[in-house]
Image: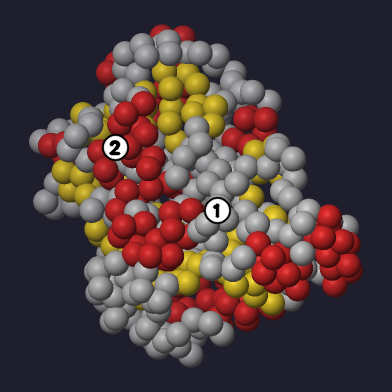
Amino acid sequence: MLRPQPPEALVDQLLDGDDLIVPLANGEPVSLLDAVEANADRLDGIRVHQMHALHDRPSIRGELGDRVRHVSYFLSHVTRPAFQAGQCDLVPNHFSEVPLLLRSCTKTSMVLAAASPMDAHGYFSLGTNADYTATFIGKVPFWIEANARMPRSFGRNQVHVSQVLGWTEVDRPLVEVPPVAPTDVDRRIAEHVAERIPNGACLQVGIGGVPNAMLTMLRDHRDLGLHTELLSDGVIDLVEAGALTGTNKVLSANKMVATFALGTQRLYDFLHENAAVELLPVDYVNSPRTIAREPNFVSVNATLEVDFLGQCASETIGHRYYSSSGGQSDFARGAMYSENGQGFIVLHATTRDGSISRIRPALTQGAAVTTNKNTVDHVVTEYGVAELRGASIRERTKRLISIAHPRFREELTAEGRRLGYL
């Protein structure tokens, strides 16, 4: 059986121009990328493809030039300033389509991934992740970083030792992301959403003040299901309250389905050897076709601004990129096709200082549309819910103005008339 090797052994397997696929968040094999960067003078044209990096690196900051360059598919606090400075790249995408993009637009030379230690049967688990990397198991060479602290998870994220080119052992704590404490505004928005979620609904929720507040409000519900991009701490409380059972799910009944997990050590302990959780590849989890098969699907996602047509800009602040599309459009489209499905786009009515309305006649110049006007369903602020599906432009404008901050409603009404929408 293949024995563990030092991280530096990986470098001997690399060729100039290789495209390395790296999981997002805690799926990043820190020691392996450290070895690649430390030996950059031996390499040329290496590209590291990754969403949502958590560790700052010379390759992200552009310090290694074209020898090793970072290509992002979703900006994080680490990659955001680097992209704005021109030090790394960003590829627009829907999260569900990242495996297809990697297959068609890169060499997919090798996958470098953190994983749990090998079990008695010779299998590693990708732990907190399945994301886009699980799609390549058995099809692309893997080099595994087996981390003693990585939880062993189940689903379609198992890699047998016969499928890896090499592996390395480490003992490193995972990055923890504590739950965001909801504000009063977050709670008012969450109330509007929670009251519209029936027992037996199948949920998609993420990290943030509004999702955290909403999950707390659902503890008295029954037979909720979970089919979500991101597994977070708030889900544990729903399970312990008996609210989240998955009994009514059509796909993976009685199971919680996600494509990656990110939170605190409590979440990682919950995930470890928990057969009730399935981590599956993102081209299955986030596929609108998959989502649509679950009846009563409820999707909740945040945006930064919405215009009178219902266009949602969720990834840019004006022309400046903040993140990327992620799975927002995937789940919005899937919920639209689900029987009795509901899609919610949530946002605060104003910017943090209250000086600018986030409900706008038109999006800020340069803003990228994440969820388009034909897909958006409900838009929610602390002032209420605007139901946009099937509504005319005149009705949309009136409904959106009604959930704007009262201080801006007169001005917004005048703009609506000027545009010919009212």
Q: Position of residue 52 (x, y in %)?
A: 51, 43
Query: Is residue 216 something that shows in the picture?
Result: no
Q: Position of residue 216 (x, y in %)?
A: 55, 80
Q: Position of residue 307 (x, y in %)?
A: 70, 55
Q: Nearer the viewer, residue 306 or 72?
A: 306
Query: Residue at left 65%, top 38%?
Result: 321
Asked where in the image residue 311 lies, by quadrant, the reply is: bottom right
Q: Nearer the viewer, residue 253 or 289?
A: 289
Left or right: 84 as drawn, with respect to 256: right
- Amino acid carrying label 1: it is Thr
Question: Earlier along the polypeptide chain: callout 1 or callout 2?
Answer: 2
Left or right: 63 as drawn, with respect to 219: right
Which structural element holds mark 2? strand
Marks 1, 2: nearer the viewer:
1
Q: Is residue 250 above or below residue 144?
A: below
Q: Position of residue 363 (x, y in %)?
A: 72, 48
Q: Nearer the viewer, residue 373 or 114?
A: 373
Asked where in the image residue 341 lies, by quadrant, the reply is: bottom left
Which structural element holds mark 1? loop
Which residue lies under the disc numbered 1? Answer: 371
At label 1, counting other C-alpha atoms closer than 10 Å, the crowd grade (few under 14, some 14-19, many 20 or more) is: many
At label 2, counting other C-alpha atoms closer than 10 Å, the crowd grade (few under 14, some 14-19, many 20 or more) is: many
Query: Is residue 86 something that shows in the picture?
Result: yes
Q: Quadrant of the C terminus?
A: bottom right
Residue 144 is tagged as: 2
Query: Residue at left 55%, top 14%?
Result: 65
Asked where in the image residue 85 lies, by quadrant, the reply is: top right
Which colour assignment does the render follow? secondary structure
Q: Quadrant of the N terminus?
A: top left
Query: Residue at left 47%, top 40%?
Result: 93
